Structure formats: structure tokens, C-alpha cells
Amino acid sequence: MNIQHLKQSFAFHFNSESKIIVRAPGRVNLIGEHTDYNDGFVLPMAIDRAVWLALRPRDDGRLRIHSLDMQPAPPPSTGAQDNPTPDSVFEVHSLTKGSGWLEYPKGVAYHLMKAGYELNGFDAVITGDIPRGAGLASSAAVELAFARAFAAVSGFEWDAPRMAQIAQKAENEWVGVHCGIMDQMAGAASKEGHALFLDCRSLEIQHVPLPKSISIVVLDTSTRRGLVNSAYNERRTQCEEAARWFGVKALRDVSVSEFTRKRKEERGWSEIVLRRARHIVTENARVLEAIELMKAGNVKRLGELFNASHDSLRDDFEVTNSALNIMVECAREQSSCYGARMTGAGFGGCAVALVKEENAAEFVHAVSAVYRQRAGLEAAVYVCKASEGASLMLG
Ligand code: GLA
């Protein structure tokens, strides 16, 4: 990201210097998929792609936002003549729902105020390089960028888990997407060079250093699937149903051996719901094993867990699509690849691979070529660095 360009855009657009730069990263989930809303375990890391804001505090509660990448929200029907520039504008003390990306900052403002924070407004230019709808948590990054900005201009402390919860509320209740807490926690609390082990029930975190001599490669299939919300919500409902059957608060409370034992005893359970539950139960076990393997530097077995996770998401949880399956296959065929799996909500978007560092460039090249040939699609494949969670710079 060219920060100079961002600052110049601010100066050009608002006719004054920006004071603060905010960066909020996307994330790639290494393992622990669809476990967050089952009170389970996840292991994401923040990546070196982010949403950026250059901003200048205001004395009132107004936000004027100029996006370098997105269309401005349509101006309100009254007072449009007061707003001749193509900015998106809102006032934190008179929020109304609309549509488009502006709902993320509005939702964050609403839920911050609901939690008792007093907010100041600001002028901002926003840009970013996280592909949208690719499973790399671009919306959580927008939410956290604004939460971080509000904290800076309103003078309250940045409390990462609390801000992650508020951002999640904004997404759940204001935007209406029933995501778990993983993306927001990864974007808020990650540490450079580390993956973030998160217990989604207690919100306890552990920064786990990435093993030496490996590269984390993101493989964007370039497929995006609509209707992802309804399929996501259906999985959530099925998991809740399974938890009721097991008589537990959430599937996090079922171990692999309990699952196997009960499954044998019971008759008449819905096969599909049992498969959903099996994914969650085994995936939680995989995350716990993955942490130990990362600490021990056992990347070979870690790769096997990546593979097992993908197979379970494909066969039991059924959230892959054929592009993701082909991509994972292409990655696994390379001798430098320890393992590969889909990442994020699924139904399209990205996979992630664990690759020998010294062969990473070759891997990127080879997988892109084989995928193009086999899927007939252009992939975006890149090595990612584990980066810091939402942060500030003087601008
Ligand atoms: C999306 C959601 C997360 C999580 C993943 C699947 O990214 O926002 O909360 O449920 O899907 O692991």
C-alpha cells in the first residue's frame, strides 16, 4: 500500500492534511473452519492486505468518507444539495439504515455508542487491497478500521477483544450477517509473525509463532458465490440442532470419542446433521493438535491436518465448490506443498496452502498454471505474511 498516495488523496480531496493513518488487516484462517459459532477453536492470522484510512478528526459528530475503491452511498433525498462532493456522509447521532458498504461504519458507530462510548466524527479517505467476498474477512477489516479510527479521534482506549465484539455486533445486528467472532478477533488482536489461537467461548488468545521455513500461500479461485448468507445460516442452524441432540450448549462440548460412542447408540438421527456435527467435532480436535504441531515445528503433520480439514469441509460440511476442490488438488500435487484446504466461509473464494519456503515462488507459478488449465479460470495466488492487528500511525 502506498501511504504517500493515500495522504495525497486526502489532501487533494479535503484540502487539508490528514492527521492519522489507520490500518486494519484481512485474515486467512489456517485451520478451525465454521467452529467459531460453535464456541470452538480457530487459528487465523492477519495478513499483509488491509483496509486503510487517512483521517482528520472533526469537532462534530459527522463523518465524511471518500472511498478510492467504492462508489459513494447515494445521497439522502433531503439536503443533497448541501453535499456536492461524491462523499459518503453520516452523522453518528442520527443514524439511519441504508444499503452498501457504509452500513459497516454506521453499525460500528451505533454499537460503540450503545456500549457507552462517546464518539467524535472525522473526515477520511478509505482504500484497501483485500479482495472482497473471497473469504479473507474484508468486511471485518472495514469494521475494525472504523472502530480503531473512532477510538483514536474520540480518545478511548483500544481494547482488542471488546472492539472485536462490537464489530461483530455491528455485522450481526446492523448489517444482518450472522458471522462468528473469528474474523473480528483476528483483525483486532493478531501479532506480526504469529497465528492467533482463539478459544471462541472464553475469547482467550495465544499468539503462536509460525513455523520456520514455511510459506503461507493464499489461492484465490476467483469464484464468488451469492446466497452464501443463507447457506451459512443453514449450517449454523444444523449445528445448533446437533448440539441439542447431544444435550450440550454448543458442539464445542462434544469430544471425538463422545461423538463416536453416541452416534453408535442413537438411532433415527438425521444423517445430514450428524455429518455437520462430525465436521465441527473433528475440526476442533484438529485445531488443538495443530497448535502443538506448530510449537514443535512438525509441518508435515500440520499439512496432513490441513488436508483432513478440507476433506471434512467438502464431504461432511459441504461448503466447498468445485473450483475450491480443484485448487486444493492442484496445490497438493506440488511436492513442495505440505497441505492445502479451503479457508473462510467457503462456497467460493480462497484456499490456503502450507508450502516449503524455498519453493514458494515456483509453487505459485505452477499452481496458477495447472489451475488455469484444469478449471479454465485465472487464479490469484500469493504468499502472505502474518501481520499485526488493527493499528495506528500518525498521518
Ligand atoms: C466467515 C465468518 C466467520 C467464520 C467463517 C467460517 O468468515 O465471518 O465467523 O464462521 O466464515 O469459519
Image (cartoon, rainbow, N blue to C red):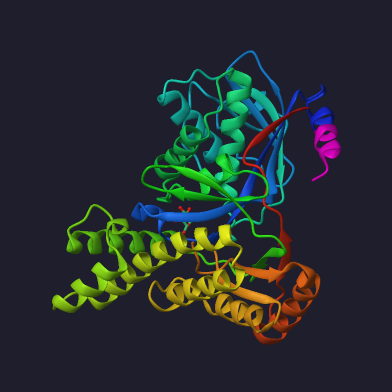
Residue appearing at x 62%, y 37% in the figure: 145
Q: Is residue 102 visible?
A: no
Query: Which quadrant would residue 79 be assigned to in this image?
Result: top right
Left of 214 or right of it: where is 156?
left
- Quadrant for the C terminus, please: top right
Coordinates of residue 16 in the picture (x, y in percent)? 82, 21
Left of 30 or right of it: where is 68?
right
Coordinates of residue 350 in the picture (x, y in percent)? 60, 66
Left of 141 or right of it: where is 265?
left
Residue appearing at x 47%, y 20% in the figure: 117
Q: Is residue 235 visible?
A: yes
Looking at the picture, tell me which residue is in the foreground, 200 or 164.
200
Q: Which residues are magenta?
A: 1-9
Q: Is residue 6 magenta?
A: yes
Coordinates of residue 20 in the picture (x, y in percent)? 73, 26
User: What secondary structure characterizes most of the magenta part?
Assistant: helix
**197 in relation to 145, above or below:** below
Residue appearing at x 82%, y 23% in the figure: 15
Coordinates of residue 377 in the picture (x, y in percent)? 69, 78
Residue appearing at x 41%, y 25% in the figure: 115
Q: Is residue 338 magenta?
A: no
Looking at the picture, tell me which residue is in the foreground, 304 or 249.
304
Looking at the picture, tell me which residue is in the foreground, 366 or 135.
366
**335 in relation to 190, above or below:** below
**71 in relation to 32, above or below:** above
Query: Which quadrant would residue 375 be assigned to in this image?
Result: bottom right
Query: Which quadrant would residue 14 be assigned to in this image?
Result: top right
